[in-house]
Image: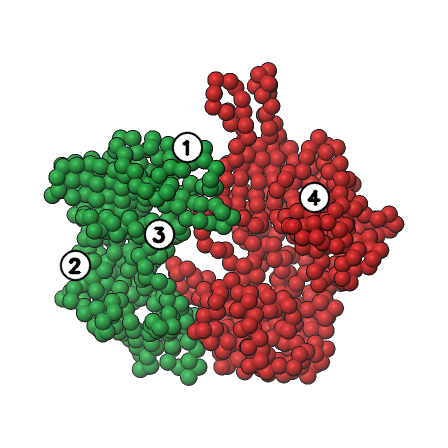
Chain colours: A green, B red
Amino acid sequence: MAKAINGEDVRVNALTIEKRLADIWREEGESDEYAVTRAALWNVVAHTWDAEQHAHATEVLGRASAAVPQRTIVIRADPQAESELSSWISANCHMMGGGRQVCSEEVAILAGGARVHHVPPLVASLLLPDMPVAVWWVGDLPGEHQEYVQTLLDPADRLIVDSSHFNSAADFALVSRIAEKTITAPADLNWARIDEWRSATAGLFDPPAMRARLRAIRGVRVASGGGGAFLGEQSEAVLYVSWLRAQTEREVPFELASEGSEAGINAIEIHFDDGSVASVRGDRERGVVIASDGTEKALDCIARARTHDLEDLIVRLLKRPEADRVYIKALRVAHDVAARVAA
Amino acid sequence: MTAVALEPNPLREGLDQERVPEASCLVIFGASGDLTQRKLIPGLYSLAHDGLLPSGQTIVGMARADMSDEQFRASMREACEKHARTRPVDDTVWENFARGLFYVTGEFGDRAAYTRLRERLEGYDQARGTGGRRIYYLAVPPDFFDDIAQHLAAEKMVNDPEHGRPYTRVIIEKPFGHDLESARALNRIAVTTFRERQVFRIDHYLGKETVQNLLVLRFANGIFEPFWNRQYIDHVQVTVAETVGVEKRGNYFDSAGITRDIIQNHMLQLLSLIGMEPPVAFEADAVRDEKVKVLRALHPIENAVRGQYTAGSVLGEEVPAYRDEDKVNPNSNTETYAALKVFVDSWRWADVPFYLRAGKRLPKRVTDISIHFRQAPYPLFSRLGVKMQANVLAIRIQPDEGISLKFDSKVPGPAIRTAPVSMEFRYATSFGAEPPEAYERLLLETMLGDATLFARRDEIETAWAWLDPLLQRWAKDPRPPHFHSAGTWGPEEADTLIEGDGRRWRRP
């Protein structure tokens, strides 16, 4: 059985990556030890700047490929490092039912110094045809006008960012511009993190009697943990408020508070014109988010809190085949909300 | 109470749970039965688990057994622990779900029980915001339909949709009769109390992802439809094979047989989805209009084989003959296997045979549709001794759901030799996630009021009208069915049925 199928990295010449990948599958076809199926629904390109990020992204996407088969390309590009361009290939295999293994291909590209600029065209040559492309930008956002970045994003259908790393309101604006001006649809890991908060809040307004109260929201208070020293720690709250404003088409007044040590939203209060308050609170122990409308009926809306492991968040974003139009609507508002937070 | 058109909840847009119905009271008649325990409550719980039920959704079980709400909840929790797709049961989700779970004791023929039921439901409208919306699930034998419908009407528990009041819907389980006459009688009962658009007839095959994917495969892809006709298709095979025998249903099955149990409903649903013309919209009546046209175009059955299993071995276990099964007449001529050659008299399908076979105690459990294309028009490679095989598009409904396309490819080497290869798509490989149970999907669609995945009255009656002559012929025929050993693919006569046409059953 091929080494790569065994999970070992095989160093290959960058010019022959595709041929060596084909060799692996040919060798595998000659072996009858296990039933192995090669599968891919996405090309996922992770862009990292250093060894730690690179190792982390490789692990995360390896696990994600169990749920979303993909050709994974993990780049480490360090312009400050010695000039080099090297690559490895391997396969991520996961047992499915019936003794069948489903394998996703993984290519690692390490580039340093001037040779960093060889990365985008090399990546373009490695993308599986006809399959969509997601670029996961790990860490700080790049400058949008760099040719390197533009070339890398050129074939991307999806750009995955994590607004918990955002430093300023301008970062939200940059992602929003990508949505408006390119064919690349942005997606945010933080947006997936607030799924259950949005779901529980939406549940509050399902009963016909509550629907009218959407127009009677006087304000919203969102409490997040983590200290709130920089914008990224408030990004979930920024996205939540932006979503509420975008979907209700109202400039809902808001207050963002810093409470608790665990990062992310931990409680929300929605205040109505009549003085009543609906609450949405997380119960980490029971793994749910519970919304109560504050009325006598007190029918709770419960959303199960899903794991926030990075691979699960990425899988959730990749399982949505089309651009998330609601996120993009919220993004348009997020810059203003974030700017007020920063101020 | 008047229903007011409500704008959709804008906060639902884009969520995984984008389509959440308004809260209603779902009343299950026959709540102490097997279906409720194995499918309905576990299915509803899984919907709640996935956040697809509204917060005030209320479920009321009604049956003869004397039980309190608490006892009913405890029994249903146990059922969910055993049968829910989303196991183990999540305590928090269950607590919230169980708060909307109630039980009313009552005989289906006792008017007072309906008065109690109505009062309870009106109370939930106030307490849980169900707004007068009602869904009645008749998980009971058809003999009770009339009683239940009449009492619901007498208690004014059925709203006419024409009057703009909160909706009332009724879900009916198969069997929808045992022949045309009884099906018509059942339908008359249903439409005496309800309008046709309030009636949701469940055929759980239509809730399966792979069955729904038949529509997507045909009508969302540009490449298949041009070839989907008599010009390119040689024949079609549909197989529904079960490894189980009659289990505890000996009484019912012996009076029904595999033709009524499987072919009249599940297989004809598959046949109509394969054979239908493109609907003008993906809407309930547009889809069902096209399906029923296929049923109307079915040519009277001329070739059919009925079989019955004798003792044999299935999946390594010795199994008894059908006639030795519990609650089966030892001289029974009921068919446990049937194979039909069917034609659809339409422009698209003229002279294309559809071979259908269904049976119990066959070697494996599988439901499979295969589209066998015609041979290439000119045997270019035949002089070189190459035997060309026809292309086959196989759609596996269950288990291991997927689609494969078989075609010939050149074997590498200097000589021209070909071998059949298969391109395969499997749901589990590509999408990983476990699809929802058919009942979950169908319950949700009923709450949302979308009848696309339910059988309409004319579908049911047209299917019976087509099958009745065959069933009557078999009923009068004193000869026993063709026997085959359990664990084999049916009697030899079924092979002859297709081999006489120069074709063979595909091994699914």
Q: Which residue is mark 4?
A: B489
- The picture places residue B458, in percent across and down from the top left corner, at 69, 55
Residue situated in front as seen by the camera: B415 or A318: B415
The mark nearer the N terminus, 2 or 3, is 3
Do discs 3 and 4 share a chain? no
Give the mark nearer the N terminus: 2 vs 1: 1
Task: Work out whether residue A129 can be spotted.
Answer: no
Label 1 sits on what residue type?
A: Arg
**A304 lies left or right of B247:** left
**Badge number at residue A63:** 3
Residue most toward the top?
Answer: B383
Question: Do badges 4 and 2 share one subunit?
Answer: no
Residue receiving disc 2: A167
The kind of residue tagged 4 is Trp
- Please tell me whether residue B492 is drawn above or below residue B30 in the rendered image: above
Between marks 2 and 1, how big is the CA–CA gap? Answer: 48 Å
Q: Chain of mark 4?
A: B
Instruction: Say if mark 2 contacts mark 1, CB within 8 Å.
Output: no
Whether labels 1 and 4 belong to a single chain: the reply is no
Residue at 61% in and 42% down: B508
Disc 2 from disc 3: Cα separation = 29 Å
Look at the numbered disc 4 and give the secondary structure of its residue. loop
Q: Nearer the viewer, residue A200 or B67?
A: B67
Tell me if B230 is positioned left or right of B256 in this view: left
Of badges 2 and 3, the one in the foreground is 3
Query: Can you tell which mark lies on residue A26?
Result: 1
The CA distance from mark 3 to mark 1 is: 25 Å
Q: Residues within 10 Å of mark 1 (few under 14, many from 20)?
A: few
Disc 3 with disc 1 on a shared chain: yes
